[in-house]
């Protein structure tokens, strides 16, 4: 079955007698995960069954294809690429009346809109119930704009604080006020650099505790967690219905670790827990504990190999749908314990859909267990697991049975073009697959050329650092340039491959001559000679749209 037959098949099997109403089809559309899925779905629906919103969205897809809707060089956010689904990313001005009309009609499909630049006016009207997500960094001054214009709409904010040695009293007061005055705010990601953080963070943490926030991400918040901060944080966990915590890689008051660990394990509301702190992970794993019964998403970084027995105990019978384990580098490991985790425990997590494991050796038994588990996964990410070609081939053999798998990432596995040849044969049998990551391997130009036969089936193909020469790169780009399916592709990553000037120029020529404006092609660090770097930069700057090729020598 071809990829573009998945959604249409379900629609075309419906008959008039089943009374399939347009509003129901529109409701179904809201659950489609990718831009390609949406386009295929819209085309499959008979025109008489499309709502005004769905028809307008289809019209916008064609406007993108025909070069009518794009980011011009005069746009304040250029270079960027138009996105229609699942996020809406449009140029700041819509000068064509029909396009502006279609955009107005599709807003009912977006209950939440991502705002990328606070100071640039939105190019479309917001419905009364539309919420806004500020998941691109905003500064404290821009937070004031959010408070002024979108007080009732902001549900998620990524706040960037950098003091550069300045006095921050007034700024912090403004942040505290905003956190208290944004009633719909549920998620805060805090990125904080500078000398002020040690003195001012407790004030912000107190404000978070008193706010409506239930999801926090401190992963880029460079503060030392002293006893007072830990106690405030623990009190917040105990007294509020906290749903998601991302805890940073930073120092923490050692005597307070048991208190924090107990609070996390005792929570009855926490559904997502990402810990990137060795001391906290060690505290959670030093004894046999059960994770909270309602926890559905877990990341531990780094995990010690010695903690595997306690980890196995903690994972048993959990309802996890997402599990990410980042192990420490080690030359000594116990194969029996590894198999206990990868063969006997993880495959028994029946609700698991998203799995990532870094630096844990995957044994032959593990490969077989994962291949049996693969058909129920949505994405699998393995990095530095010593799979080699033999392990990859075992996993790839399961692709024809995978109906849900959207992303397969096999990075730094020391695999060669043998794995690429196998993937070229099996990917057409897995039409749900959207992303393939083979970065840091050794597939060479031969492997890249093989994958050119399936590149039009993927939205993202990541081949960074694979010893691919110009012939392999050009084969991929030319294959993309011959198919309209690639018009919605997002990335082809060829960075850190020895393309040299001739290869980069051929890629640029292939992109320029293609009628299909697919997404970014990453050409960073592909040329060594200084003069050739300058020549390539000039050629990329001359492209009609600089975003077609991503360049940073």
Image (cartoon, rainbow, N blue to C red):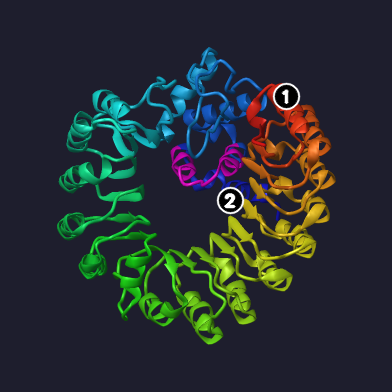
Place of residue 13 in the rendered image (x, y in percent of width and height, measured from the top left): 60, 50
Looking at the picture, tell me which residue is in the foreground, 453 or 309: 309
Label 1 or label 2, whichever comes before in sequence order: 2
Disc marking residue 10: 2
Horizontal side of residue 27 vs 286, given as left or right:
right
Q: Are marks 1 and 2 in contact (CB under 8 Å)?
A: no
Q: Residue 403 sits in which quadrant? A: bottom right
| Residue 47 forms part of the magenta stretch | no
Instruction: Identify residue for label 1.
Output: 538
Neighbor class of circle 2 (other Cα within 10 Å; few <14, some 14-19, many 20+) is few
Q: Quadrant of the C terminus?
A: top right
Q: Quadrant of the N terminus?
A: bottom right
Helix, strand or loop for the magenta stretch, by majority:
helix
Q: Which residues are magenta?
A: 23-42
- Residue at position x 79%, y 61% in the image: 417
Place of residue 342 in the rendered image (x, y in percent of width and height, measured from the top left): 52, 77
Looking at the picture, tell me which residue is in the foreground, 402 or 528: 528
Residue 404 visible here: yes
In the structure shown, which secondary structural element does the residue marked by tag 2 occupy? helix
Looking at the picture, tell me which residue is in the foreground, 472 or 8: 472
Place of residue 123 in the rendered image (x, y in percent of width and height, measured from the top left): 44, 20
């Amino acid at each position: 079955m071809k990829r573009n037959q998945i959604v249409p098949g379900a629609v075309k099997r419906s008959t008039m007698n089943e009374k399939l109403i347009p509003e129901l089809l529109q409701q179904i559309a809201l659950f489609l995960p990718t831009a390609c899925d949406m386009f295929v779905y819209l085309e499959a629906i008979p025109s008489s069954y499309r709502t005004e919103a769905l028809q307008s969205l289809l019209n916008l897809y064609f406007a993108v294809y025909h070069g009518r809707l794009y980011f011009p060089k005069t746009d304040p956010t250029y270079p960027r690429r138009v996105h229609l689904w699942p996020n809406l990313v449009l140029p700041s001005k819509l000068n064509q009346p029909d396009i502006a009309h279609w955009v107005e009609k599709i807003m009912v499909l977006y209950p939440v809109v991502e705002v990328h630049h606070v100071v640039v006016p939105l190019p479309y009207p917001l419905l009364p119930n539309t919420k806004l997500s500020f998941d691109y960094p905003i500064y404290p001054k821009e937070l004031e704009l959010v408070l002024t214009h979108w007080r009732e709409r902001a549900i998620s904010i990524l706040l960037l604080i950098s003091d550069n040695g300045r006095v921050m009293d007034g700024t912090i007061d403004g942040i505290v006020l905003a956190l208290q005055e944004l009633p719909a705010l549920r998620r805060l990601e805090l990125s904080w650099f500078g000398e002020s953080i040690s003195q001012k963070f407790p004030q912000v943490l107190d404000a978070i505790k008193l706010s409506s926030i239930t999801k926090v991400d401190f992963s880029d918040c460079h503060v030392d967690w002293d006893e007072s901060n830990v106690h405030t944080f623990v009190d917040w966990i105990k007294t509020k219905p906290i749903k998601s915590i991302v805890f940073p890689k930073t120092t923490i008051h050692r005597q307070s670790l048991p208190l924090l660990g107990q609070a996390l394990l005792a929570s009855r509301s926490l559904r997502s827990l990402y810990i990137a702190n060795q001391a906290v992970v060690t505290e959670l794993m030093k004894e046999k504990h059960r994770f909270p019964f309602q926890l559905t998403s877990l990341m531990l970084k780094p995990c010690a190999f010695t903690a595997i027995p306690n980890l196995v105990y903690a994972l048993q019978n959990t309802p996890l749908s997402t599990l990410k384990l980042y192990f420490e580098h080690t030359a000594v490991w116990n194969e029996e314990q590894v198999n206990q985790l990868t063969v006997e425990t993880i495959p028994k997590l029946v609700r698991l859909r998203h799995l990532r494991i870094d630096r844990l050796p995957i044994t032959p038994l593990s490969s077989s267990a994962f291949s049996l588990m693969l058909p129920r996964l949505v994405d699998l990410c393995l990095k530095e697991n010593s799979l080699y070609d033999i392990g990859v081939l075992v996993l790839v053999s399961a692709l024809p049975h995978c109906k849900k798998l959207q992303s397969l990432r096999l990075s730094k596995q020391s695999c060669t073009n043998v794995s690429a040849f196998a993937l070229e044969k099996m990917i057409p049998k897995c039409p749900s697959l959207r992303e393939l990551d083979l970065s840091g391997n050794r597939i060479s130009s031969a492997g890249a050329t093989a994958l050119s036969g399936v590149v039009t089936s993927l939205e993202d193909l990541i081949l960074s650092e694979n010893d691919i020469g110009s012939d392999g790169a050009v084969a991929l780009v030319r294959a993309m340039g011959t198919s309209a399916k690639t018009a919605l592709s997002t990335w082809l990553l060829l960075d850190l491959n020895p393309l040299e000037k001739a290869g980069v120029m051929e890629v640029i020529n292939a992109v320029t001559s293609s009628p299909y404006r697919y997404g970014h092609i990453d050409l960073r660090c592909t040329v060594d000679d200084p003069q050739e770097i300058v020549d390539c930069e000039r050629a990329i700057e001359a492209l009609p749209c600089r975003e077609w090729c991503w360049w940073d020598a």
